[in-house]
Image (cartoon, grey):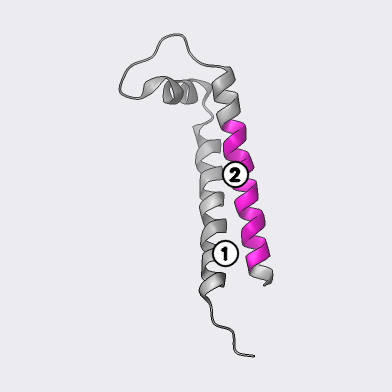
Amino acid sequence: MKRAVIGGFLGLIGTLGDIGVFIMVSNNLVGTWQTPPGRFFSTLMQLEIWPLLAFSTIILWVGLIIMGVEYFRKEDK
């Protein structure tokens, strides 16, 4: 049970981090960009906050994996 709560908190922290990066990028869009990466990713690279997005996404997935493992784990009582 304790690990599921920890996974939930990690998932919440990762989600809040991703939302924060998305809001920051949407408020500071670039004026010119190339078509293949797009405007969002061009802004992400120009602001140099892609490591924060990657880190928070990893934290989100780790939390989801921990919760998933704990959900399907069999406990002997």
Give the residue type at disc 1.
Met
- Mark 1 falls on what kind of element? helix
Residue at the outermost bottom position = 77
Q: Is residue 39 left or right of residue 6?
A: left
User: Which residue corresponds to the image point at 63% horizontal and 54% vertical from the top-left?
Assistant: 10
In the rendered image, the vertical position of residue 56 relative to residue 65, given as above or below: above
Residue 67 within the segment the image draws in magenta: no
Quarter holding residue 32: top left
- The quarter in which the C terminus is drawn is bottom right
- The quarter in which the N terminus is drawn is bottom right
In the rendered image, the vertical position of residue 55 relative to residue 4, given as above or below: above
- Segment colored magenta: 4-21
User: Which residue corresponds to the image point at 62% horizontal and 33% vertical from the top-left?
Assistant: 20
User: Which residue corresponds to the image point at 48% horizontal and 13% vertical from the top-left?
Assistant: 30
The numbered disc on residue 3 is none
Give the residue type at disc 2.
Thr
The numbered disc on residue 67 is 1
In the rendered image, the vertical position of residue 8 relative to residue 13, given as above or below: below
The mark that comes first in sequence, 2 or 1, is 2
Q: Is residue 5 left or right of residue 61?
A: right
Q: Residues within 10 Å of mark 2 (few under 14, many from 20)?
A: some
Residue 63 at what x, y percent from top left?
57, 57
Q: Residues within 10 Å of mark 1 (few under 14, many from 20)?
A: many
Residue 16 within the segment the image draws in magenta: yes
Dominant SS in magenta: helix
Residue 3 at what x, y percent from top left?
64, 68
Q: CA distance from mark 2 to mark 1?
A: 15 Å
The numbered disc on residue 15 is 2
- Mark 2 falls on what kind of element? helix
